[in-house]
Image (cartoon, helix red, strand yellow):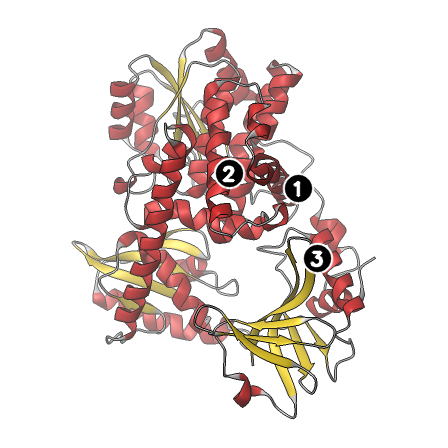
Amino acid sequence: MIGRLMSAVFESRGYAADFYSQIETVSKNTMKDIDTLCEILHGFKERQERVVVLPDYDMDGICAGTIGFAALSEMGFQVSLYIPDNSRGYGFDASDIQEIMKLYPDTKAILTCDVGSGCYSGIQYADEIGLTVLVTDHHSVVSLPKEACAVVNPMRKDDIYEHPHICGAFVLHQVLMHYAEAYEDMTVCESVARLRVFAGIGSVSDAMPVLHENRQLIRDAVAICRSVYCEGDFSYIRSMGTKDIYTKAFQGLFFVLKAYQELGKITCPDDIDETFFGYYMAPMFNALKRLEEPVRKAFLVFFGNNQEARVAELMALNEKRKLIVEEVLDELSGQMNPHAPYIYIGQVPGGLAGLIAMRLMGESGLPTLVLHKTENGFGGSGRSPSWFPFLSVLSEMKDERLSAAGHEGAFGFEAKSEDALFDLFMYLQSRVSELMPEDMAPEVDAMVGEGCDIPLSLEVMGEYVRDKRHLKPFGVGFESPVLLVRVDMKFAEISYIGREEQHLCVKLPSGVKILAWNQAGEETELIRDGILSVIGDINQNIYGEKSTLQVEGRIV
């Protein structure tokens, strides 16, 4: 039974009475061809023939590659990890297969993860030189590569897996758990199961819906991360008693968490949750892709020497990425973009286009492309809100000059000419006006405080915080609530906090704090009839042994 405020949130969203129990259901069947793939894989282990793990290079791919290399090593395979050249773009081709054979001449099989369903030429070449290719992936394709000996992908058209929207790392983890349960003892099964921590991180970083089996996966990932962190102590990893490659994967994870502890981002185990994965871990690793740095640096965090220094290098690159993003945004806002707010063209580093499109979309609420000129026209990335399925809309145009690939809300994009972009701009204007929701104002799930049906009392706030803890994780498909909080300022104390006193802090007689970031001084214009209104959320802040309830958001 949830409390008054969370009940109001559920009612506002139109959730049915059984909504929560429905999103907690999991798929009862396994993915198509999982038995076939595991049987083939087992033959390579029995013969001790080399299997090479071939991952994608984004955070999901990094997590998948880590799972594959660590799990197969732990299960006694002759296994190597091929680190893709991310400068060549998504997927792999014959040149990657040639590079694999140069590095590992005794390779007999390739196990892909988070990639492969559409890599027809690469798989065809591998088949021609006598390699067995086993594909695990989660990307939709029109047809499967016929030369692959097995393809496990919940998004394939002939699969009946109930909840197919899972990340590539989770697909691979399910395959390897299936293998371990069929062929390994309980101890090895437990070791492989523990690697689901990386699948949970990959799920959040790849913006998978936080529904069905993804929910328990993310909860498990949070719990395992908290054990690995162990308040900055190495004892959990020492107790594993596993093989070196497997142990190093968890050592790398420990050093990532330790680095954020030293930055003050982790002060207690509760700070490690799905938000931490999405807000800190994923951007740090994805900074490599965005800055066009070799993805090898990510895998060295989990399998290289001097792992702590490797983490520090990634964190420095992420800070560099943040600065470049701000510079590019300033440049785009200062130049003419006749197709704005839908299309922006500038000197944008290819790896940052998607991130900048996300920022611009966040400001406008509209589908956004960020492009740069190429030899063949224009290329870049796009982001689109949930109410505008960009790939489907683009396919309606049936314009061969325009192409996009990826997900409906996040995709790569190419155009062959300026005329094609103009035609797209005109079409987007028309379709956006048809599909845009009537109310584009920030959605508020419930109102609480002065003049509202629900009071801003300690009891209501405490109950709400407990409900949120029980209902976690939040994310795509089950977003964290957004509240409108109204505060009577009659007895409130106002102060400014932060190094430059840029943040507003309002303390109420009950001890509750209202925090509005970067809005110090704005309250004088925004207090109306003695009431301060804030759009945000209620959280519990724990510092040492002291716990306080606070509202964090933006004054409106």
Q: Position of residue 439 (x, y in %)?
A: 57, 78
Label 1 Cα neighbours within 10 Å, binned few <14 / some 14-19 / many ≥20? some
Amino acid under disc 2 = Arg
Horizontally, is 457 left or right of 93 in the view?
Answer: right
Q: Which of marks 2 and 3 is in front?
A: 3
Q: Quadrant of residue 95?
A: top left
User: How far apart are the alpha carbons under marks 2 and 1?
Assistant: 24 Å
Pointer 1 residue: 216
Label 2: state its secondary structure: loop
Q: Position of residue 331 (x, y in %)?
A: 25, 69
The mark that comes first in sequence, 3 or 1, is: 1
The mark that comes first in sequence, 2 or 3, is: 2
Label 1: state its secondary structure: helix
Residue at 73 percent across and 77 percent down: it is: 509
Pointer 3 residue: 468
Q: Eyeballing the image, is 179 above or below 1? A: above
Horizontally, is 500 left or right of 87 in the view?
Answer: right
Label 3: state its secondary structure: helix
User: How far apart are the alpha carbons under marks 3 and 1?
Assistant: 15 Å
Q: Eyeballing the image, is 85 above or below 326? A: above
The mark that comes first in sequence, 2 or 1, is: 2
Label 3 Cα neighbours within 10 Å, binned few <14 / some 14-19 / many ≥20? some
Q: Nearer the viewer, mark 2 or mark 1?
A: 1
Q: Eyeballing the image, is 46 above or below 10? A: above
